[in-house]
Image (cartoon, rainbow, N blue to C red):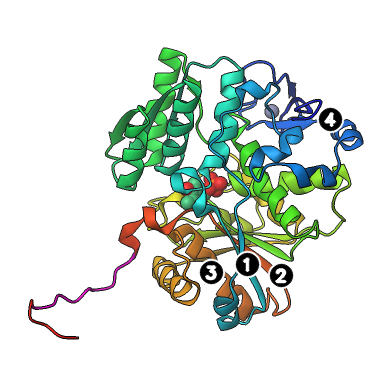
Amino acid sequence: MSNRISYIKGLHCPKCKKEYSEDQIRHLCDCGSPLLADYDLSEAAKNWKKEDLKNRKPDLWRYHEVLPVRQEENIVTLGEGFTPILPLKNAGKKIGLDHLFLKDEGVLPTGTFKARGAAVGISKAKELGVKTVAMPTNGNAGAAWSVYGAGAGIKTVIVMPEDAAKITRNECLVAGADLYLVKGLISDAGKIVARSIEKNGWYDASTLKEPYRIEGKKTMGYEILEQFGWEAPDAILYPTGGGVGIIGIYKALKELQELGWIEEKLPKLIAVQAEGCAPIVKAFREKKKESEFFEHSSTVAFGINVPKALGDFLVLEALYETNGTAVSVSDEEILGSVQEVAESEGIFTCPEGAALYAATKKLSKEGFLKAEDKVVLLNTGAGIIYPDTVRKEIPYLELDAVL
Ligand SMILES: *Cc1c(COP(=O)(O)O)cnc(C)c1O
Ligand SMILES: [Zn+2]
């Protein structure tokens, strides 16, 4: 890697504006808000040009100038990033869109885009000298942090609801994590983790309680813009749980503007949630700046079953500032979309990704999205890690059957 590897210069609180050093372990702001990483972008812009990317490896570390790791030897990588953007020609046509695309995060290590957050989060934790990280998870984040933790020599303690996808348990176990199950929700797992961290002094890797997972996820924004030749698409749809990805993409867009690599025009950012867990959609409809706890949440798309996100105000800001919107869809629509996208394109999406197709259908019908709009769906994970989303009956044959 060339010259200076990272232009990180500190952390700041988006709520009370307090600043912190990035050279020490820091979780939330004293005021309780998540922290965001800052870079010296004017300095970076002097030494770093878009053209430099042409000779770099197709992974997320190609944007190392705007990632937090200072020393190359701390980078733990499994080749994550630079996932393909596939045109959904048939599926798009069906719902009246001529330029519908899907960025397929299902090809990442561990099968979801949680690999991006884990790669950068674990690498920075290694740089900060962390020995043990702990987190509550609905499954996918735990799997990713366990795997990257193993690569970094960092111990991982993972607590997940017993309903979380079974495969994610095995990913944690095979990587040597200490895995625990709870008969409850991720919020219950979170309370156990919080108590245990206080007792044992572990590094808290809960969603948005450390500032670097966002940095990994923001690379989706950098990639989308690079892959579209630095011209913003009209809309990006994102399945929103904790909101890390959408906050990250918005952050990437602002950084790219500051670097002078993209124009004024930003894509409309659209948060998609399940009807059974839609706190952001409710807050957006009520034009609020924060969401309320969504009682008795439930959905097949467990990656977006987050009843109250710590960064909800940042998600809502991203929607308002980009003239985006928020949409909810039913589990029935989600499961129907898994089938519809797979049958028309051959792409087996995760239910969270399929929710976006269902939402796009609604937005196209309502006229929020137009036929000529360039629209990108983020399929955040692989369908093959959710075998139970396919509910077709399979006929049995007698041994002497002929078809
Ligand atoms: C975690 C997760 C999400 C939600 O991600 P956030 O960035 O926390 O909103 C969406 N899809 C899948 C597959 C996930 O694992
Ligand atoms: Zn603060």
Q: Which residue is mark 4?
A: 40
Q: Amino acid at mark 4?
A: Asp
The residue at the point 37 percent across, 51 percent down is 296
Nearer-N-terminus badge (3/4): 4
* In-image side of 162 versus 366 (left or right): left
Q: Name the quadrant of the N terminus.
A: top right
Q: Which mark is residue 101?
A: 1
Region in magenta: 390-398
Name the element at disc 4.
loop
Nearer-N-terminus badge (4/1): 4
Nearer-N-terminus badge (2/3): 3
Q: Amino acid at mark 2?
A: Lys
Res 194 quadrant in image: top left
Q: Residues within 10 Å of mark 3 (few under 14, many from 20)?
A: many
Asked if the stretch drawn in magenta spans residue 393, the answer is: yes
Q: Position of residue 343 (x, y in %)?
A: 44, 75
The residue at the point 48 percent across, 16 percent down is 131
Q: Which residue is mark 3?
A: 357
Q: Amino acid at mark 1?
A: Phe
